[in-house]
Structures are given as structure tokens and as C-alpha cells.
Image (spheres, rainbow, N blue to C red):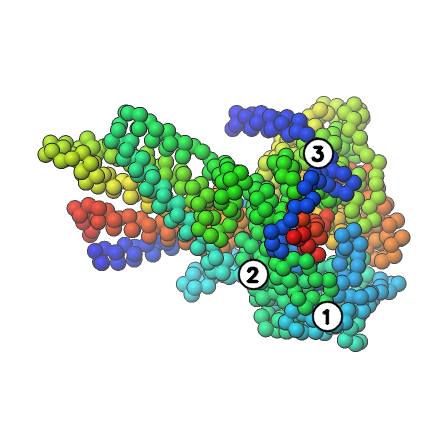
Amino acid sequence: MGRYLGKRLVSTIPLLLVISFVVFMFIHMIPGDPARLIAGQDATKEDVAVVREQLGLDEPLLVQYGQYMKGLFTGDLGNSIKNGKTVAETIAPRLKPTIMLTFSSMIWAAIIGIAIGIIAAVFHGRILDYVGMVIAIAGISVPSFWLGLELIQLFSVSLGWLPTSGLETWKSYILPSLTMGAGIMAVLARFSRSSMLETMREDYVRTARAKGLSESLVVMRHAFKNSLIEIVTVAGLQIGGLLSGSVMAETVFSIPGLGRLLVDSIQLRDYKVVQALLLFFATEYILINLVVDVLYGVINPRVRYE
Amino acid sequence: MKMYKKVLAAALAGAMAVSMSATAFAADENGYIVKATNEDSKSSDNDLVIAIEGSVSSMDPANIPDTNAISATRGVYETLVSFDDNQELVGKLAESWEISDDSLTYTFKLRQGVKFQDGTDFNAAAFKANYDRVVDKDNNLRQRRTFIIANADGSETSRVESIETPDDYTVVIKLAKAWAPFINRLTQFCMISPAALEEYGNDIMNHPCGTGPYVCTEWEEGDHTSFARNEEYWGEKPGVDTVTIREVPEAGARTAMLQTGEADFIYPTPSDQIEAIKGTDDVNILTADSNIMRYVTLNMDLEQLSDVKVRQAMNYAIDKDAYIQLMYSGYGKPATSVVPSIIGGYEEQEAYTYDVEKAKELMKEAGYEDGFKLTLWGDNTTQEIKGMTFISQQLAQIGIEVEVQPMEPATVGDKIYVDKDEAEINMWYVNWSASDFTMDGSLRSLLYSSMCPPTSANTAYFNDADFDKDLDEGLATANEEEQAKYYGDAQKIAWEACPWLFLGNDQIIYSTKSYLSGVYVSPDGAFNFANATLAQ
């Protein structure tokens, strides 16, 4: 197990190198000149040239990539072109809101989503199944932007129970978590349902029933446990998505998260910040996949690591 | 793709029909669109919360990337001279000033007894220290351009020949060449404590220290900026204990904050939010004129657009009132010159009143009775696409087939700032606001002959020697009468030559709780909260 983890971690290094190269080249290939954006529309060609030189953008692309890689290994990711803050200073304050929201959204979405999925599968083709799937389709279909604003209107403006924005108290997490979790709840409900339906048709479930086990034991111990692999895979991907920030929810609820930072930085062609964020997101996905793989073994001891 | 475009066009037309029919609420002479019916409403605390759309992306007043950063830094920092709420130049840290007849020597008498927030004295040496910091190339500050000109050969020229400090409270600035906008530019040159600069260097943005009415207590970019009243302030102290500027990008969320009382002041208020807010009885919605000029540049190097008759015809073919109604629910004014009326030296020009018949006649005279095709570039926001679609529909009336090409803003920039022989631009839907409120700042980079791309933004490729001369003469004199003559002449030349489609000047809309006073938005979009008071 330890060796497996070590091997997996080492194998991420070439992957991250490839990603860093692709990200660097892509972001520099998008049209748009950060020097011009910074200097302003009315700046003269000379003013823009001065800014370009100060930003180090006058060097050939490969030289810039070399400098970037050198920085990466020495821990110097450069500075944001917007205000000169270091990339670490720019990203660090955005992590906490994003992580807190990821978990507060994920927890309720997973509990409710999986519960709906199981109930729908158990009562397959009956009214509870339809009710569950209507909830799931609604969760997927409602645009989070609209949902967020409607929740604010109801719970903040009309009822006055919850704050409209910010993340000062636990109460302020409720509306954004509901907004961000709705779609995930729906995805998990649908996946749990289909996965459960599949396992419930398996021979070992029929055997369990034939042994005379109670239905709840059959569902939870035999069917659900075997469906978990698929559910965990999907949930892992969803966590990855949430950790990359949610532009919509962050915008509606004025949350300074990673999603808005990425969009703002792309618009400003703040290369250093965009590169760091994308590399960070890629690492996140790799690590989550690793955790999911490890969980497979926990869920199903027959899974062996090599 | 074609189908997609058709669907998009239909959707846009639908959206326009809806917004065209929306009733606008006219503002009264004091700028109120909606006046609170409940004027006895009280604030529950003495803490002002301002919710704004964008981000306060810098707290270093010499390195300001946007208007919100101007607003926030002005809580902490002050300048020698500033604009008051009537856009008149007044002394702030300077008690008085004199400009020599040759417009080269500026003598400032500084206010005495003013201290920075760290206890350092404000004096002539402090001014000099700030100047030295800004012009130092290594500091890489945006404000450097106020004092240094970059030349085509890579060399640099200083606008300032010398700065002398004959005594502690006198600063004498000698310019190398007369430059009329200089005094206006000084309204953006903030004084930072020299001791703090010594200690923090360019990290001063994380440790703001000025002479202003507030002390910055926290700056969390992307979320909020907080201030507390400066108890040692030399002038009239603010009425509120603290100020928090919250960044709330979504208009509906700002509106909700004002309704619940979580915010006392929100800016901007998009006109489609007025209906939602006006039911709240203790809210005022106000407008102010802006320095924003909306226009479409016409590439005069193109054969079809080289004839002034064609360009005038295009201006006649646009219903400017409908444009303002459609785009800003009526909160704006059709353009009456090449600059907004708020710019110093503005002179009203004879309107190109909407007249399709006259436009068709001019097209016929120019030999383009059957029209021609053009492309129109602009940003890809919903609002900009709406404006461009409107222009294309209006010009279709006189046979000009306009293909609207919205692009991501940085991409537009890339396509525009190219060498002249590579220029593909036909028309550009754009806007401009001169933050120094000068005629030169409004016109030079947009219409001066040597400012064509890639040098700068003269995308009309307008080239008129008399116009250039007027701008140069205006720049070289500080005599207001002479300047008015040159600038009046320049406006007339550009207006008659029609290098642009002159569209309009929109208005700024903001909303406040009725118990808040002393906070307002300036025409450049910066808000001022120095004199804020909350009724309790």
C-alpha cells in the first residue's frame, strides 16, 4: 500500500510537467496583450513597451517558460500583474472560502443525494422513485445563478433569516451551500439510483434475499456497499469541481473564492496567477483521484494495489 | 452557425422590445430618480457599508488599476488639490497655488500642521519624497506616466524640470514644457507618509498611511476593505465610526443588501434594478452625469468611409434618443459634442438629429445609394452586443449592412493595436472616460493624427492638421480664454468631420438609505465617503 502510494505520487510529477507546459503555452497563445491591458487604451506604443519589459513579456516564450519552471522549483511563482502581490499572496486568502464551501455543499448534497438514490432504487417504478427523480432533474436543471438569487429573495429579503452575502458566520454558509450543492445532490441521486438498480439485480443480492435476510440488511449491506465504488468515483469528481471554485455561486453571494479569481485573472491575462491556479487545480484532481483509488480498496477489500 | 445567429438575433430583438417598453423614471433636478417616502428611518449602528460591483484591487495610490481603487485610497490619502462635488478645483493639502504666465512654474503653499497617520509631519520634503518614489523606474508604478514621457526610441523625457522646496511649506515645480493638464493630474497624486515609505517600500499597499479622514484597518482584495475614523484628522472628521467597502459583483445581490439594510449605499444600480428597489420606503435612487463618452469609430482610411457625407449620413441615421432609452432606460443624454458636457472647455455642437431621409440623400450624393457592407467590433458583453445590434439595425435603414462581431475585450485590443497596413478595423463600438476631465485627455489619444494604432487609440485614423494644432496650442497655454478658443475650434472640426458615430453620455445611478448623507459618486465613477454621516 505504502509502495503503491509512493509510486502513484512519483508518477504525478511527469504528468504535472506536461500540464504546466500545456497550460503555459495555451495561456500565452490566447489573443490579448497584458501590457496593453495594464497600460490602458490611451497608452502610447512606447508606454506599452515599457510595461511589457517590466513584466518580462519581451523575452522569447521558451525563455519565459524556463524562468517560470525555475520559479516553480524555487517556490517563486512570480507576481500578479494587477497589483504586484505575489501569486501565493493572491491565491492564499481565496482558499479558505472555497474549501469551506466545498465541504459544506458536499456533505449535505452527498447525504441527501445518496438517500434519494437508494430510496428511488428500492421503490423502483413507484411514486417515491418518481418524486426522487423529479427532485434530481430539478436540481440539475435549475441554473445556480437563478437559484441563488431566488434563495436570497426568499430567505434574506422577505423572511430576513439569513444574510445575503459574505461568509462571516455559519449562517452565511447556508444559502451558498444550498446553491452549490443542488446540482451535485442531483447527480449523486441519479448515479446512486442507477448503480443500486444494477447491483440489486446481481445474483449475490438474490442469494441474500433467499437466505431470508431482512430487506434493509439486503439493501444496505449487500446492494449499497457494492454500489459505493461508482458513487465514490462520481463524488470525487464533484469535489474536484467544487474545489476549483464556483464562479456562479461566488458571484451571486459575493464570496472571494478561486472561481472568481480565475475568471478575473484570465480577463486581465494575469498569466502568473492563471498558471498557478490551473496547476493547482490539476494537482487537486490528481490527488482526489488517488484518494478515490485508495477508497476502492477500503470499500472492497478484493481490490489490490500493485 | 447561421441558424445560431438568427436565433440570437431574434432573442436580442425580443429583449430590446421588452426593455424599450419599460417605463423610465425621470430624475428630478436634484438627481433623484426615487426619493424615499420614509425620511425618519434611522440607522441601527454608526458603521457605513458600501456595496460595489468591482474589486478594490490596489491600496497603493501611485499604482491604481481601476476606479474602485481610486475611491478606496481616497479614504486614506489626500492630494495637494482636488475636485469638489461640483468638479471645481480646490485646495486640499495645498492652501493656495499659483501658475506663472508662461504656464511653466507651479508654486504651492502647503497646509501647515497636517500629520500623517503615523505621526510624521506633512511638508515639502514629504511631497518631494513621494515624487522621487513615483518617478523611480524600479518601482514600476503606473503614476510614473504623469511625470515621464516614453519616447519612440526607447528614451524618456521628464515633464518636470525641477522641484524646489524653498521652505518647509512651499513647493515650486518647474515644467520642461507647458502642459495644461498638469494641475488636473495632481488631483491624482496622493501623499504617502515618507516614514512609512521608508519602512515598507512598495509593500505600502498593505500598510496604507496617509493624511486622510480614515485609517485603513483591513484590505482583503476580492472581498472587503475596512476603515475607521481618523481621530487625529486635520479637517472635519467623518460622522461614521467605520466604513466597509464590500465587493458584491451581482446587481441583484447588491439590491437585496440595500433592502435588508446590510448595505447603506450601493453602486452602481443598473436601471433594471430600479423597479425592485423602489418599493423599499427608506431608499433614495440618484443619478449623476458621467464623463463617459459612447461612440463608434469609423475607419476613415476605408474607401466607403472616406467621404464625410457618408459619415454624416450615418450619424443622421441613428436615433440617439432611442439608443439612450434602449441601453440606459433613458438615463443618459445624446452626445452633443465629441466630449461629454462635464469636460472643461466643452462646447455644444449642432445635433445630427435623427433623419433617415436626409441620411439617404447624403448617401446618394456620395454615390452610395445602394449602400455597402461593414463590420462592427466590440466587447462580447450582453450590454455591448445589444448596443452593436441597435447600430446595425439603424444603419440598415440607409442600406449599410453591418456585421456585428463581438469579441472578448483583450482580443479586440489585439486586433486593434496593429500596424496601419495590417489594420482590418471598420468600426469599433467603444467608450472613453478621461479621468483627468481635460479636453486633451479626452481627445488626444483618440483623434490626434500621430496616435493611430499601434501607437494609441485613434482607430478612426483621423488626420486633421488644424485639429492637431488646436490641441497642441491648448496644451501649451494655461490661459483659460485662449484654451477655450482652441478647444472650441477642435470640437467643431471633429464634430463636423464625423470620425465617429456620436452616441451618448450615460448617467451614473446609485442608491442609498435615506439615513445616510455625505456620500456621492463623482462623474468619473469614483465614490467619495469622506463626509459620511448616518442618522441614528
Please name the residue that numbered disc 3 is placed on: B25
Residue nearer the viewer, B12 or A168: A168
Asked if residue B285 can be seen in this view, the reply is no
Query: In whole angstroms, how far apart are the C-alphas of marks 1 and 2?
Result: 24 Å
Query: Badge 3: few (under 14), some or many (20 or more) residues near its Cα, within 10 Å?
Result: some
Q: Chain of mark 3?
A: B
State the mark number for residue B218.
Answer: 2
* Figure check: B371 above or below A15: above
Compared across the picture, whether A145 is left or right of B318 comes to left
Q: Position of residue A142 (x, y in %)?
A: 45, 33
Q: Chain of mark 1?
A: B
State the mark number for residue B114.
Answer: 1
State yes or no: discs 1 and 2 in contact (Cβ < 8 Å).
Answer: no
Give amino acid for label 2. Answer: Glu
Residue ID at (51%, 50%): A166
Q: Position of residue A47 (x, y in %)?
A: 66, 57
Q: Position of residue B213 (x, y in %)?
A: 68, 62
Residue nearer the viewer, A14 or B280: B280
Compared across the picture, whether B166 is left or right of A234 comes to right
Q: Position of residue B59 (x, y in %)?
A: 61, 60
Task: Point out the residue furthest to the left here.
Answer: A211
Residue ID at (20%, 51%): A305
Asked if residue A136 can be seen in this view, the reply is yes
Compared across the picture, whether B69 is left or right of B236 comes to left
State the mark number for residue B222.
Answer: none
Query: In whole angstroms, how far apart are the C-alphas of marks 3 and 1?
Result: 45 Å
Give amino acid for label 1. Answer: Val
Give amino acid for label 3. Answer: Phe
